[in-house]
Image (cartoon, helix red, strand yellow):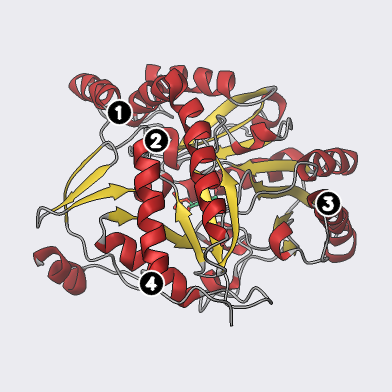
Amino acid sequence: MKTKELYDEFLITSMVGGFEPIEIADATDTKITGTDGKEYLDCFSGISVVNAGHGHPKVIAAAKEQMDKYIHTCTYVYYQPRAGELAQKLAEITPGNLQKSFFGSSGAEAIEGAMRLAKHYTGGNEFVALTNSFHGRTYATLSITGNSGRKIAGGPYMPGAVFSQSPFFYRCPWGSKTEEECGEKAAKALMETIKLHTANNVAAFIAEGLMGEGGLIVPPDNFFPLVKQMLEKEGILFICDEVQSGFGRTGKMFGIDHYGVTPDIMTMAKGIASGFPLSAFTARADVGDAFTPGSHLSTFGGNAVSCAAALANIEVLQDGLIENSAARGEQLKAGLIEMQGEFPIMGDVRGRGLMIGVDLIKDADKTPNTEAAAAIKIACREAGVLIGVGGSANVLRVQPPLTFTADNVDHVLATIKEAMQGINTELA
Ligand SMILES: Cc1ncc(COP(=O)(O)O)c(C=O)c1O
């Protein structure tokens, strides 16, 4: 495989568990084809990016039309129509009174910008985040990432980053018997963390609308409403990180839409343009206005081709794909839950829309079963189905393009079942 040799020789890589042994020749809708001609059903979407499918014709057409006019002029020096139009669209589709956007190129860049904006607006300089969270690989975003495995050999990290236990019901830190109790305990713990472990100068609390890399953790229904109420009393902003859970992924436009809560700032990337590099953060107008001339800029941010692609992408998503994500997600979840009876290592099936995880365990103590997850992923790939793995490398992640059909779901279920039948699925 020629590209593997080039990677080994000339690329800096650090992929956990090594690369998938596939050299890409083509990717169309839900199908990826290798240079050896082998075809795969894509259930990982380039890490949850191509929500409208690989190379959606309308997204491609919009990008091509823009490329024929101009590609880059710098959105923050000259007025660039596509950026204006996309910002207006984001104000329309984000919850409540979120209105003003800033564009960057990556998820981490959006979060760094949102953090800076929160500092400007509040005058605070501390951030509270959740354990199991993931917010990116830059210095500040890794500092607020609550997953020590991602931070090895990178410290010391940014001061003023504090963590509170995540509302992870299946492995509830308080041993709660109901999701509601777990959500309430987590909200109280967050406020205690702020009181006990900060210098009372918190700019923002940041959390994902559905925790992706941490293992598809769905915060209980009462968590965000309780937290938002408490934060408002303290004058602390809520930044909702929708980088992974946005743009129809969870069966609604954004993960936070399931809670009826309006954050003060929302961060977006990945699915925003189904593959074109673009990110954004959208804030309440008064919060957005806290930046003064010179406060913030991004050379590539809001690239005209990416913005044009995003506008077409959002239209495609709104034209039935978000509903499809919800329906196919229910079908997938129901099939996996049915399988749980047959395979005891399938400890938990969770998620929303086409953002579904299977928590594999070894024993009654729910010890993460990383070996089984690796084996299932390989068996699925060999059978032509690409899935991801997350959490403590023990959670199977099924996050396909939102164009997934009922037949695609049945095929994935049958493939996972066959893979399970090939390994020891009894608890120790
Ligand atoms: C929730 C969340 N935030 C931020 C990021 C970082 O995004 P990027 O890799 O585009 O910088 C990710 C990436 O996986 C993510 O899942």
Sequence-first disc among 1 and 3: 3
Gap between marks 1 and 2, in whole Å?
A: 33 Å
Say which mark, if any, is on residue 129. Answer: none
Q: Are marks 1 and 2 in contact (CB under 8 Å)?
A: no
Q: Which residue is mark 2?
A: 406
Sequence-first disc among 1 and 2: 1
| Helix, strand or loop under label 3 | helix
Answer left or right for 4 relative to 118.
left
Tag nearer the camera, 3 or 2? 2
Q: Are marks 1 and 3 in contact (CB under 8 Å)?
A: no
Residue at 23%, 21% in the rendered image: 61
Circle 3: residue type: Ala
Say which mark, if any, is on residue 375. Answer: 4
Gap between marks 4 and 2, in whole Å?
A: 25 Å
| Residue 168 visible, this orientation | no
Circle 1: residue type: Val
Answer left or right for 373 relative to 29.
right
How packed mark 4 is, by other alpha carbons closer than 10 Å (few <14, some 14-19, many 20 or more), is some
- Locate residue 153, reporting x and y percent: 51, 79
Circle 4: residue type: Ala
Tag nearer the camera, 4 or 2? 2
Residues 100 and 44: in front is 44
Q: Is mark 2 within 8 Å of ligand 1?
A: no
Q: Which residue is mark 3?
A: 187
Say which mark, if any, is on residue 305. Answer: 1
